[in-house]
Amino acid sequence: MASKKYDLVIKGGRVIDPALGFGKDAGVFIKDGLIKKIAAVSAAESKEIAALGEKQLIDASGMLVVPGLIDIHVHLREPGREDAETIESGCRAAAAGGFTSVCCMPNTTPCIDNQETVKFVQDRAKDCNAHVFVVGAVTKNLEGRELSEIGDLVKMGAVAVSDDGKYPQNPEIMRRGLEYAKMFDISVMQHAEDQLLSAGAVMNESYQSARLGLKGAPPVAEEIAVLRDIALCRFTGSRLHIQHVSTRGAVEAIRKAKAEGVNVTAEATPHHLILTDEEIGKAFNTNLRVNPPIRGADDRDAVIEGLVDGTIDCIASDHAPHPEEEKDCEFDRAPAGMIGLETTLGLVKTYLIDKGYLSWADAIRKMTANPARILKLPGGTLEAGSPADIAIIDPEKRWTVKAEKFRSKSKNSPFIGWKLTGRVRTTILGGRIVFEQ
Ligand code: DOR
Ligand code: ZN
């Protein structure tokens, strides 16, 4: 029977795989959850394909067919805050955003600083709509005092370590964390914030914070944190990944370190690439409260420049769900964080591709091959033999972000009501359709 040769065929779309340097119209052939090949559909095959059932043949005419997107910075909140998000709901949100792999941060309750909790997350993720890779804690309970058993975490499958949300303030601890991580050739992912400089801050320190009478975190709090850890990274020869870069100072420090051959990589979020702190005074929308804070235009422009010139390797959402009742308060009392899995692709297309900063291939590279390379994750490519993790994108689809449409349990997005272009049509995980618009 013809349908035995392939389980699923995607035909008629434009295939973009930056890892392969591939960018043209082709069919994608899937068998047993793996990519069999990307190839023009031959006349003989055309017949075979025509015999496939409608569930096995996807017509992607006018669409882009890309490797499933990878987000290396998300908060899934489980265990501990299942009211905000669960691994299951977070994975549904991922699939709806075109992401087939996510890396979850360890700031849960209990914290992911031990093997049991790594295992718990992995077990919960088993039948979900995305692959979940666990990032363990650098220090026990993210307290910055005592290192976690990083070796145990890695043995259990942790792909990196991070104290995200916190910055190990003690350089001796960070040095040892980098050295411990180096033994396993994994990255330490760093939330760069000198908490002595940013104490009490609820937004960026700027003209805007002065005008609004809100305490601000100076951009130099990030720059200093990045500079210290670049120095430690150079000294230890470890791998350092700077999370959610938001300042010119950080971008310049990373650019210089990379030129010197220091093993540092970096990510930026859509919100730091698009928004400025001027937005906050308009309506005091608490969904604009994030850490690091939304900065001024000069910092925002520097982050874009860094993304364009390769200083910043990848785009990550920092998907940080918080329930409505906790965000429904004064700006300075709201918890920091915004969701991002379901808006990232549309924001990237509308504000980075359509504005001429990135090509589709650049953008897809920063959401597939590059994050896969940094954390050594499987996937990120459509190469034959790879898992059939695929996103089919409708590149010119216009849509409006609506709170009631989010699959995430939380709705804390400042982009609600925004009109975007570019949306995921179908997401495929290991050959299984996990999302269809
Ligand atoms: O805004 C943020 N929210 N930044 C972080 O670093 C942590 C995150 C969270 O967990 O809510
Ligand atoms: Zn963070």
Image: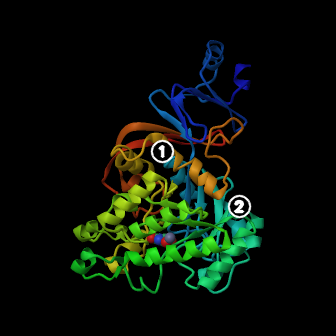
x, y percent for residue 157: 73, 62
Foreground of the two, 312 or 316: 312
Identity of the residue drawn at 39% across and 54% down: 404
Identity of the residue drawn at 66% across and 37% down: 383
Q: Amino acid at mark 1?
A: Asp
x, y percent for residue 365: 53, 46
The answer to which quarter of the image holds residue 150 is bottom right
Q: Amino acid at mark 2?
A: Asp
> Element under label 2?
helix
Can the viewer see residue 74 in this picture? Answer: no
User: In the current view of this chain or complex, which residue is farthest to the front?
Assistant: 260
Q: Is residue 364 left or right of residue 162?
A: left
- Nearer the camera: disc 1 or disc 2: 1
Q: Which residue is mark 1?
A: 362
Query: Around disc 2, counting alpha carbons within 10 Å, would you say few (fewer than 14), some (14 to 19), or many (20 or more)?
Result: few
What's the colour scheme?
A: rainbow
Mark 1 vs 2, N-terminal side: 2
Q: Is residue 71 left or right of residue 413?
A: right
Q: Which residue is mark 2?
A: 123
> Element under label 1?
helix
Mark-to-mark CA distance, 1 and 2: 34 Å
